[in-house]
Every structure is written in structure tokens, then in C-alpha cells.
């Protein structure tokens, strides 16, 4: 075996994209979603994890930025992995954290990015979410009830 300089070895490893979001519900069990101005569908508050940022802090940051809710995210509910697809040339790992319960939806903090924020019954939320996010909802709600984390590999 040939020894390789650690810096060179790390540079040679494959890379992937990472995103994180928060599952927030209200007292009635409705799911908080945000409607970005640049997408056709609604989504969980969340986004891309910045370089050097832990995923749980990214989820909390995005929740504050997109929905105006300051919360310490809790249990990691779900990890989702998807292969490269379309314009995305690298695999994507997504972390969905428990964002707790909120009393009411806040107004979008940046109306140029987020057009609407609202709570929806899980069935309605599933219809509003993009397919890749909709498949996360039921397993994440079940993981929250069970107090455990689930892994959701790409079908």
C-alpha cells in the first residue's frame, strides 16, 4: 500500500450536498410549510448546510430565516439520501430535525425569498410538498411519535 499525504487523500474523496430542515407542528398537529418565491411547491423550512456548519444549526438558522421562528431543534427525525439527479451532479443527504410545536405561523422574514408561511393538515402538506419532501413527512411524523431516527434511502 502506498502512503498518501492526508490532505491529498481527503481531496480525492467523493463529495455530496447536504441540506437540513425542521419539522414544526402546531397544537392541532398541522405541519409548518414555507412557499419560496423561486419554486412551484411548498417545503419544510430548511436549506443547504453551509461549509463547516453542523446540520442541526443549519436547520435552526433556516427556520429563523424563512419562518421567523427561533427554536432549538431537537431530535434528528430522518436522514434521506438521494443519488445525483438532473442538474445536481452529486448525491444529496438531507437531515430533518424536530423543530417542536409553534403556536402560530410567523410572517415570512424575507418576502423576496419566502412568499407564504402556513400550517397544513398532514394530508394537505403531502400534496403541497415536492415529491422528494412529501415522502419524508409520514416517516418523520412516525419517528417523532416513536422518539427515534429513521433512514430513508432513495427508492
Image (tube, rainbow, N blue to C red):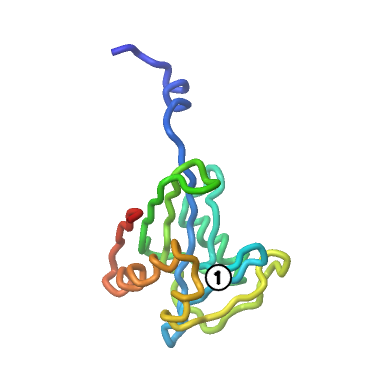
Based on the displayed image, in which of its 4 quarters is residue 63 positioned?
A: bottom right
Residue at position x 44%, y 86% in the image = 27
| Residue that sits furthest to the bottom in the current view | 28
- The foreground one among 143 and 152 is 152
Q: Position of residue 137 (x, y in %)?
A: 39, 70
Q: Position of residue 17 (x, y in %)?
A: 49, 45
Q: Is residue 103 above or below residue 76?
A: below
53 left or right of 116 in image: left
Disc 1 marks which residue? 42
Residue at position x 33%, y 12% in the image = 2
Q: Position of residue 125 (x, y in %)?
A: 47, 77
Based on the displayed image, in which of its 4 quarters is residue 41 positioned?
A: bottom right
Helix, strand or loop at disc 1? strand
Q: Is residue 46 above or below residue 28?
A: above
Q: Position of residue 53 (x, y in %)?
A: 52, 48
Residue at position x 37%, y 61% in the image = 76
- The foreground one among 84 and 76 is 84
108 left or right of 132 in image: right
Q: The C terminus appears in which quarter of the rendering? A: bottom left
Amino acid at each position: 500500500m502506498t502512503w498518501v499525504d492526508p490532505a491529498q487523500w481527503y481531496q480525492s474523496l467523493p463529495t455530496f450536498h447536504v441540506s437540513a430542515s425542521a419539522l414544526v407542528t402546531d397544537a392541532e398537529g398541522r405541519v409548518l410549510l414555507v412557499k419560496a418565491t423561486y419554486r412551484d411547491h411548498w417545503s419544510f423550512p430548511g436549506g443547504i448546510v453551509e461549509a463547516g456548519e453542523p446540520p442541526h444549526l443549519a436547520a435552526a438558522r433556516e427556520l429563523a430565516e424563512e419562518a421567523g421562528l427561533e427554536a432549538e431543534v431537537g431530535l434528528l427525525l430522518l436522514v434521506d439520501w438521494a443519488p445525483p439527479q438532473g442538474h445536481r451532479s452529486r448525491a444529496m443527504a438531507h437531515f430533518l430535525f424536530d423543530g417542536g410545536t409553534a403556536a402560530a405561523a410567523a410572517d415570512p422574514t424575507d418576502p423576496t425569498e419566502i412568499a407564504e408561511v402556513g400550517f397544513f393538515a398532514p394530508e394537505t402538506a403531502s400534496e403541497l410538498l415536492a415529491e422528494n419532501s412529501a415522502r419524508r413527512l409520514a416517516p418523520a411524523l412516525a419517528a417523532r411519535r416513536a422518539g427515534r431516527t429513521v433512514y430513508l434511502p432513495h427508492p
